[in-house]
Amino acid sequence: MKVCVGTTNPVKVRATERAFLRAFPDREIAVEAVSVDPGVPPQPVGMEEVHRGAKNRAREAWNRGSYSVGLEAGLIKVGDVYVDLHVAVVRDPEGREAVGTSPGFQLPPDVTEEALSGEEVGEVFSELVGVREIGKRSGAIGVLSDGKVLREDLCELAVLMALIGLETPR
């Protein structure tokens, strides 16, 4: 089974492979990273923008006969706070799409404030903790949870949740 991922970020690519291996344990999975333009700002804010980025990534990476995955992270307002959340859109070989999300988590207030002003969470957090390209590593969640939860875990869960929507009878 071929799966095209609308990113070259190794965390998102590995997470997609893990999700498909869990969902289809008896299938051989070949995952391909595809560089695409998500069509949203580097730091998406709001569910509509985050979803649009994931959808655009999945559609840009899609080839008939394959699955495609778009993963986008962004800040979503929940009550009076923002949480960092990943949204996945999975497109099946026929072109049907389904959406899934990861669990969300709060960032330190100063990181959220800078991200809301246009800075990328990954860039801000990388500077804060002194780890280059943290979004291609454990992610902010990896640091905040002391390694108990990694960005790869959140991405994998978002893809798995989207796959449920494709497997559910419509």
Image (cartoon, grey):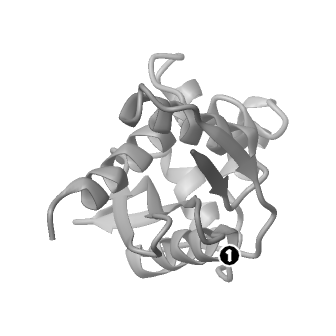
Indicate the position of residue 96 as horizontal and vertical percent values: 39, 74
- How many numbered discs? 1
Q: Nearer the viewer, residue 24 or 41?
A: 24
Q: Nearer the viewer, residue 62 or 152?
A: 62
- Tell me if residue 38 comes above or below residue 104 in the rendering: below
Look at label 1 and name its amino acid.
Glu
Q: Nearer the viewer, residue 40 or 43?
A: 40
Q: Residues within 10 Å of mark 1 (few under 14, many from 20)?
A: many
Q: Residue at x 43, y 54 (%)?
A: 85
Give the residue at the far right of this rendering.
Answer: 132
Please give left or right for residue 162 compared with residue 90 in the image: left
Question: Can the viewer see residue 148?
Answer: yes
Instruction: Name the quarter where the C terminus is drawn.
Output: bottom left
Instruction: Name the quarter where the N terminus is drawn.
Output: top right
Callout 1 secondary element? helix
- Tell me if residue 70 comes above or below residue 157 in the rendering: below
Which residue position is annotated with label 1? 60
Indicate the position of residue 23 as horizontal and vertical percent values: 37, 36
Q: Nearer the viewer, residue 68 or 116?
A: 68
Please give left or right for residue 106 compared with residue 155 in the image: left
Q: Residue at x 62, y 49 (%)?
A: 2
Question: Can the viewer see residue 105?
Answer: no
Indicate the position of residue 64 as horizontal and vertical percent values: 61, 71
Q: Residue at x 52, y 30 (%)?
A: 18
Indicate the position of residue 79 as horizontal and vertical percent values: 22, 66
Q: Residue at x 43, y 26 (%)?
A: 26
